[in-house]
Amino acid sequence: MGKTNISLRGKNILALEDFSPEEIQLVLDTAKEMKNIIHRDIKKVPALRGKSIVTLFYEPSTRTRSSFELAGKYLGADVINITAGTSSIVKGESLRDTLYTMEAMGVDAIVMRHKAEGAPEYASKVVSPVIINAGDGAHAHPSQGLLNLFTIQQYKNTTDLKGMKYAILGDITHSRVARSDIQGMRKMGMEVHLAGPKTLMPRFLFEEPGIVIHDRIEEAIEAADVINVLRIQLERQKSGLFPSPREYARIFGVNDERLKLAKDDVLIMHPGPMNKGLEISPYVAYGDHSAIQEQVQNGVAVRMALLTLALTGGKDSEADS
Ligand code: CP
């Protein structure tokens, strides 16, 4: 798509439905530059010097929170972390008052995870710092969708993803990653294939154009150029959506036998954390086709890109210095 004049400066990063394909590609192109910084001995550039970032997490996280923190630090920003369990949130402070407190301290960006869908959008309406959604309920996880796209472009060595078949397997209903993937992959021209238990497949998706829903997981595996295996979100499940973890692994798990059905150059992804032996076998998770570790590193690069573009527009980025 080449160089464009588009700018994401000041944009709240809430969901990929708010992004054009050109804006998505700008993030991915910027992430490619940022990834070079991660490979340096001294991982520090002054692109965000003088900026302050808060990570505000009401739900647990390993990858997303720490990669946003590292991303900010590699870019020279000041980063502080607030988690629900160790802040005045445990004393009953409301989300709005917590946001007002951060705004009063002069922060430039709030990276936010919350169990309530729409909480980051609400935040964007009540305070002035840039809001970055780091996952809200089952609604959206835009930076995960972007790092998945970046990983595919890197592995497939092309920015042209049109016609590529992207399979999302498992618990679609509870997955914010699935929603952001569906939006992002379709904007970039990919064909989305879904498979999993019918009890974990939202009905509205059957009506959506550009989506193929398979009755059997094997059909999606055979069709796919890229497979994203979703985590079974045991913490969000109501009971009775599948018979037992053992039955789930037997019927829907991506294991070495099912991997034999896939294309020779298939790419296996998983957002993490993995339930190994449930939705994915250790052989598949750590095997030759797996991009899962690379996704984690790419998460830092994509989040560096998002912070730079949202806080500076990227024009004055000193990523090369
Ligand atoms: N993929 C993902 O969101 O992982 P964390 O919950 O560890 O941030």
Image (tube, rainbow, N blue to C red):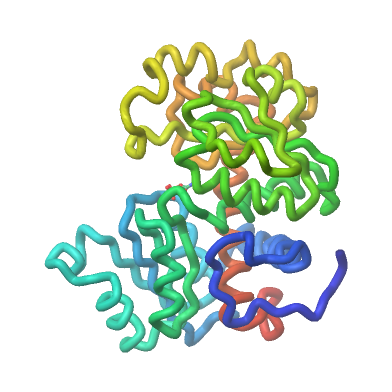
Q: Is residue 248 visible?
A: yes
- At x 61%, y 15%, the residue is 256
Residue 296 against residue 32 in the figure, above or below = above
Q: How many marks?
A: 0
Asked which quadrant contains residue 115, the reply is bottom left
Residue 284, percent from left and from top: 59, 23
From the viewer's side, name the closer residue of 46 and 68: 68
- At x 53%, y 29%, the residue is 170
- At x 41%, y 13%, the residue is 246
Residue 208, percent from left and from top: 68, 43
Residue 78, percent from left and from top: 42, 78
Horizontally, residue 214 falls left or right of residue 62, namely right
Horizontally, residue 145 falls left or right of residue 210, namely left
Q: Quadrant of the N terminus?
A: bottom right
Horizontally, residue 20 falls left or right of residue 162, namely left
Q: Is residue 46 visible?
A: no
- At x 75%, y 48%, the residue is 154
Residue 27 against residue 241 in the figure, above or below = below
Q: Quadrant of the C terminus?
A: bottom right
From the viewer's side, name the closer residue of 39 and 23: 23
Asked which quadrant contains residue 126, the reply is bottom left
Residue 280, percent from left and from top: 52, 24
